[in-house]
Image (cartoon, helix red, strand yellow):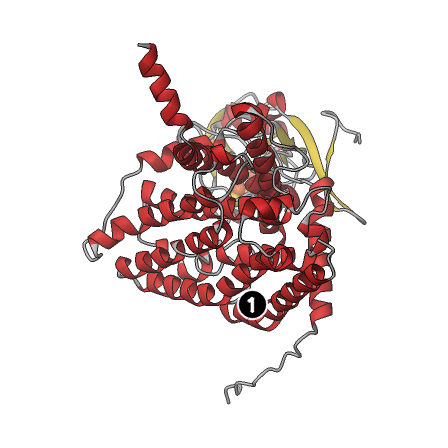
Amino acid sequence: MPPRPVEKHVHPRGIFSRFKGNLEAIAIGVKYFFDPKRSTLIYPKEYIKLREGYRGFIVLVKNKCISCSSCARICPAAAMKMVKVPVTDPKTGKQRIKKFPVINYNRCIFCGYCVDVCPTEALYHVPYHDIVYESMEEAVTDLESFQKEPEYKTAKEGLPVRYIVDEVKGLVKIRVKKEGGEKK
Amino acid sequence: MTGWVEAIIKIIEWPPLWQLVVLGLIAPLAVVIYILWFERKTAARVQRRIGPYHVSPRIAGGLQLLADLIRYSFQEVIIPKTVDKAAFISAPLIALILSILPVVAIPFTDVPKWFPLPMDYSLILALALVTLSPLFIIVAGWASNNKFAIIGGMREAYLIVSYEIIAILSFLAATAMTGTYNLVDIVHAQTGWKWFIVLNPLAFFTAFVGVLLSTSGFPFEIAESEHEVVAGAFTEYSGLMYGINMGAAYLKRMIYSLLLTVVFLGGWYPLKPGEGFIWGYLAPSIVIFIKATILMMIFSFFRAVYGRYRLDQAIEIAWKILFPLTVIAFGLGLLEAYYGII
Ligand code: SF4
Ligand code: SF4
């Protein structure tokens, strides 16, 4: 049975409590006007310095990879692909074909499944994600570029900041050092 | 040659022209542009944002309004096929003219040489002219032939009925106190810091809220409420025409602020108008404009704090709270006049 409409009665407030409410609202406004707690990120001039463990761009450590293809299989966006590469076997010295993953950042959703599933920890995240490619082709890595950490241009030009939740002030933006530690 | 220059200076100095063009249009426009910037910055400040910034970071985004103005001026003005063309085009223009017209009745000095009109009934005249422009907002809404515009116009009509009596009666409290309609005499009665805001704060309060109601400032921005009726009566307007509509509302608020300054905030005091054009006319009007600008800043500060009342709530506030207060304020003025405090 659908819920019946109920007539709601809101008790009308007296004049004085209304005045009080208005004055309180204005007082809060004045307080913020003289002590603004801005938390806007002025983006290219400042950037959020993310912590280690953030699921950003992905880098392959080729030596550790055992070509198991787990990463390509688990990828929900079909962004990971295996490419065949001719290698020389270090023990026997014979030529053989080995498969390595490459990633297509047009498709990747940065879910991190590939990093989690890798049995030898051959993949890892870098803690940044704001990188712009000029063309879609550029966003498809080859084996070479997949092994390098992508260049983080924002960090070169901007100042690193971080947002913390203060008990009194709420969301607060603080400056941090480029490398590691925090500074007020 | 010099004869020409003198003649031109004479024409410019001719009080009605000077008052209407310079004090009525150019100076308020400059103040309004500043106020629009201030409004956006304040709302941003209070709401923890930054507001206009990237256009000119050095002066806190001050050029943003200029950029907006240029954008409005060069946008295409679209006139839909279904509108009543003559009324559609003329309504905002008439509203703009009517909203700056009351300035001819406001004295900016007490030297009779610089009065644009005889000042004997100036308060009544100013109030009468101020109440004309909202009619053309209704016309604009009706001419647009669009449901949002018509609803917006109707809301405006409801609000006119509610605020007009409040605004007029609370301004007339000054007449009750001084026994004159002459704005110059009303200012003269406020010598020695006996400003009417101190003597009759209630009347100032009701006049203040009445002005907010009439110029659809927050929290009474009901006729143009964006979430409900797009832009109210101005829904079909675009480009420069929309700019004129919005500008007219702000200009009207500016003119109201000038009137509030003259009636309640002591006019040109603490300055005493002296001899000549500079000290007799320019300096007092600058004082009045500074006070009015501060009032405008308070008006636009409310944008940062308030949400929006519903139409019925606004009308309820107007009739159940403000109207009795206005009558009390009027009575207070009469009492003060009776006991000779003025
Ligand atoms: S992060 Fe997710 S989407 Fe991206 S490549 Fe790895 S598994 Fe695929
Ligand atoms: S899951 Fe790890 S080891 Fe397996 S192919 Fe991918 S990167 Fe190589």
In percent of width and height, residue B142 lies at 29, 61
Q: Residue at x 66, y 61 (%)?
A: B333
| Residue at x-position 28% and y-position 57% | B144
Name the one closer to the observer, B310 or A89: B310
Judged from the image, the quadrant occupied by ligand 2 is: top right
Q: How many marks?
A: 1
Q: Give the residue at x 68% y 74%.
A: A13
Question: Residue at 55% of width from left, 55% of height from top?
Answer: B212
The residue lying toward the viewer, choosing from B40 and B108, is: B108
Question: Which quadrant of the figure has residue B160?
Answer: bottom left
**Residue ID for mark 1:** B318
- Residue type, mark 1 in image: Ala
Badge 1: residue crowd in 10 Å (few <14, some 14–19, many ≥20): many
Image coords of residue B323 (percent x, y): 58, 69
Left or right of A140 in this view: A71: right
Q: Residue furthest left?
A: B81
Establish whether ligand 1 lies closer than 8 Å to the Cβ of label 1.
Answer: no
Residue toward you, A28 or A125: A28
| Depth check, front residue: A137 or B281 | B281
Residue A8 lies left or right of residue B163; in this view the side is right
Image quadrant in which the C terminus of chain A is located: top right
Q: Is residue B187 left or right of residue A175?
A: left
